[in-house]
Image (tube, coloured by chain):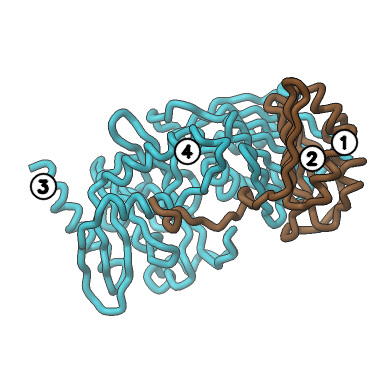
């Protein structure tokens, strides 16, 4: 099967390139952050709460997409959780997902959400709320 | 901030359902929603080997209707929001849907029938070997006919016309295919048939129905074919042939054999590209697609009415059946 035949529009934006990658090893703990936004990647890399979670969970993989095309319709925050997955949504444009079993922190961050809000408010609410 | 724990101890209503051959373990706090979903469940006896779970929390304090959909996905998780009160989270690796919805959405049977169930099967199906294929499906005396074609090729009008000449209707737009033993099984859902506005020229009874805007933005008649046309509906069948539909300007009809590679390419174009985290799901899906691609396939070019095309296809299928059984 050729690439051309496999081509699909990336409607879910799963395959947005994330060129900003930081990876660290602390003993057996592996911490990695990937993003398409340098400011987010740097902010997450230096975030205290992220490093606390990394130590607690025995490693953490983070992937954040700055979503320039998503809606910016609301600022109300909702967290849905079933124990393993915790999902924070703020409006429809910002969605953060924490999978505690797989130690993965994933998310789409709406254009209007500043990095300091992501780090000081949204991620703490998701991880500690 | 709202915190909505989808905790099983709060989801008192539990039942086993079946959608497109996939077993579904439902838990919810709403007896009304449980009843509505039970009404959409179709038990076929040919369930695929693995099922999925739905954990639905209904927030009775919210009456927000379903808004415009917004989908995103990363790794093994896909999210769909229909307004701030209606959030769906699909965990593909664990074959689980968790959702929080408003009381208004919980009571909207059409929303679950036309949107949530097909989306759930489309997203979680890859982890169950259940492949959504963009094709109609009809059944004649146990033999299934898959009719593929691009949007606007006339799959839905032809499906109705075939149903009127003796076929049983399974689906008109999306068919869910799973492996069973050495073969495959095609499943329909309770979703209504979607007929474009010009279908009223061929089926006058559509004048009794109203055009509605469907999820992809098209105006269409969305009807229950059994009620609207009095035709027979089957929910599952074993496909024997795959037909690729192409409309031409001139009158007439012609069948040309197609190669498995062309069929495989078409089915692949129906499915979502999967990330590396879902490698095993992708491999399982690929095995199902391979079986579909091995079906005898023909390109069917026709010009004229769907009734004319249905007559030609009926003759074609009768001949193929004679070849097999005689």
Q: Cβ–Cβ below 8 Å for labels 4 and 3?
A: no
Q: CA distance from mark 1 to mark 4?
A: 34 Å
Give the residue pinned by disc 3.
B323
- Frontmost of labels 1 and 3 is 1
- Label 2 resides on the chain identified as A
Crowd rating for badge 4 (residues with CA inside 10 Å; few <14, some 14–19, many 20+): some
Up-down: is A113 above or below B182?
A: below
Question: Which quadrant would the C terminus of chain B be assigned to in this image?
Answer: top left
In the rendered image, residue B16, in percent from the top left (x then y), is placed at: 54, 26
What residue is at 65 percent from the left and 36 percent from the top?
B33
Residue B149, image x and y in percent? 37, 60
Measured Cα–Cα span from mark 3 to mark 2: 58 Å
The chain coloured cyan in the image: B
Instruction: Kindly identify which residue carries mark 4.
Output: B282
Identify residue for label 1: A125
Between marks 1 and 4 in the image, the one whose residue lies nearer the viewer: 4
Whole-number angstrom distance, CA of label 1 to CA of label 3: 66 Å
The answer to whether B194 appears left or right of A28 in the picture is: left
Q: Looking at the image, how many numbered discs can be counted on the residues?
A: 4
**Spatial separation of the CA atoms under disc 4 and disc 3:** 36 Å
């Amino acid at each position: 099967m050729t690439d051309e035949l496999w081509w699909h529009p990336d409607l879910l934006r799963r395959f947005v390139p994330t060129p900003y990658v930081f990876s660290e090893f602390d003993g057996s703990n592996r911490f990695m952050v990937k993003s398409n936004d340098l400011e987010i990647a740097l902010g997450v890399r230096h975030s205290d709460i992220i490093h606390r979670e990394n130590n607690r969970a025995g490693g953490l993989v983070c992937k954040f997409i700055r979503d320039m095309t998503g809606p910016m319709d609301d600022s109300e925050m909702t967290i849905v959780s079933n124990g393993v997955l915790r999902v924070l949504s703020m409006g429809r444009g910002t969605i953060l997902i924490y999978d505690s079993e797989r130690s993965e922190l994933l998310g789409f961050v709406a254009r209007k959400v500043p990095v300091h809000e992501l780090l000081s408010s949204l991620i703490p609410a998701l991880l500690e709320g | 901030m709202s915190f909505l724990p989808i905790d099983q101890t709060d989801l008192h209503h539990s039942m086993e359902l079946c959608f497109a051959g996939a077993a579904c373990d439902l838990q919810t706090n709403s007896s009304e929603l449980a009843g509505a979903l039970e009404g959409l469940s179709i038990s076929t006896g040919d369930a695929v080997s693995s099922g999925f779970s739905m954990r639905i929390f209904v927030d009775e304090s919210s009456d927000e209707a379903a808004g415009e959909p917004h989908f995103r996905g990363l790794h093994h998780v896909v999210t769909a929001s229909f307004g701030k009160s209606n959030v769906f989270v699909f965990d593909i690796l664990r074959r689980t849907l968790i959702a929080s919805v408003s009381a208004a959405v919980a009571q909207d049977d059409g929303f679950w029938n036309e949107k949530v169930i097909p989306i759930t099967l489309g997203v979680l199906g890859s982890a169950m070997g259940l492949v959504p294929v963009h094709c109609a499906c009809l059944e004649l005396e146990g033999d299934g006919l898959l009719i593929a074609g691009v949007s606007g090729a006339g799959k839905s009008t032809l499906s109705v016309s075939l149903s009127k000449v003796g076929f049983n209707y399974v689906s008109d737009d999306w068919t869910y295919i799973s492996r069973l033993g050495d073969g495959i099984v095609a499943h329909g859902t309770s979703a209504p048939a979607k007929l474009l506005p010009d279908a009223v020229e061929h089926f006058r009874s559509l004048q009794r129905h109203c055009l509605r805007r469907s999820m992809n933005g098209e105006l269409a008649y969305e009807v229950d074919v059994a009620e609207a046309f009095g035709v027979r509906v089957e929910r599952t069948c074993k496909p024997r042939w795959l037909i690729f539909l192409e409309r031409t300007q001139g009158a007439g009809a012609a069948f040309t054999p197609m190669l498995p590679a062309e069929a495989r390419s078409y089915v692949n174009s129906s499915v979502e590209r999967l990330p590396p985290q879902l490698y095993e799901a992708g491999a399982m899906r690929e095995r199902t697609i391979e079986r579909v691609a091995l079906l005898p396939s023909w390109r069917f070019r026709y010009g004229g009415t769907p009734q004319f095309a249905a007559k030609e296809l009926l003759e074609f299928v009768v001949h193929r059946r004679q070849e097999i059984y005689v």
